[in-house]
Image: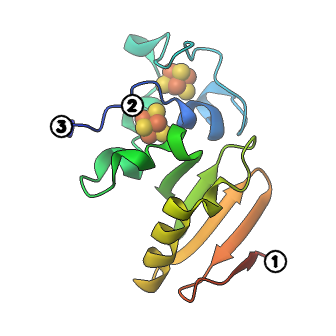
Amino acid sequence: MDIPGKACGSCSLCCQVLEIEELQKPAGRLCKDCMSGGGCGIYSTRPDVCRDYECLWKGDRGMSAQLRPDRVGTILMEDPDSDEYRAVCDPARPLAWRTPLVFNHLVAMAKSGRTVVAKAGLKSWRIHATGEWGPCV
Ligand code: SF4
Ligand code: SF4
């Protein structure tokens, strides 16, 4: 069920940033079916992976409107293959995760015990509960 105030609107960052094997779409390249201004050009026939996807901002009443992914250049998501809490950035804004609104959120998640990683393309950084951060090796 949609949460009031949590519509994707003009955001289409997941359609750009994430790899979608079903569409043979590499990470970082905007899907060919994404419409300018947001929205899916094949909405009624989009693959299940698109149907099922929802970033954490969209599903969390507690995250402010300012954290909408296109506004901060960062998608907040659980990594499906590990217990990492991830900030996946628009490759055009690889350090978007360091904007105070996002960074403070990531430090709070690290303080709660999560393993927090920011990613932009092939680069990744670990964010610690102390507020320190550094490249993943
Ligand atoms: S990143 Fe989140 S808010 Fe943006 S289009 Fe995808 S699901 Fe919607
Ligand atoms: S098919 Fe539609 S929802 Fe899926 S990535 Fe492309 S534009 Fe986005």
Along the line of sight, which residue is nearer the eye, 19 or 101? 101
Q: Are marks 1 and 3 in contact (CB under 8 Å)?
A: no
The residue type indicated by label 1 comes to Val
- Which quadrant is the C terminus positioned in? bottom right
The residue under the point 32% across, 32% down is 7
Q: Which of marks 3 and 2 is nearer the N terminus?
A: 3
Q: Nearer the viewer, mark 3 or mark 2?
A: 2
Give the residue type that dot 2 points to. Answer: Cys
- Name the outermost residue toward the front: 100
Name the mark nearer the viewer: 1 or 2.
Answer: 2
Disc 3, SS? loop
C-alpha span from label 1 to label 3: 39 Å
Tell me the element at label 1. Answer: loop
> At which x and y percent is residue 42?
47, 11
Q: Quadrant of the N terminus?
A: top left
Q: In this view, does 89 lie to the left or right of 124?
A: left
Crowdedness of circle 2 by 10 Å Cα count: few (<14), some, many (20+)?
Answer: some
- Choose the circle earlier in sequence order: 1 or 3: 3
Q: What residue type is labelled 3?
A: Met
In the image, which disc is placed on residue 8? 2
User: Label 1 belongs to which residue?
Assistant: 137
Residue 100: horizontal and vertical position, in percent?
A: 55, 64
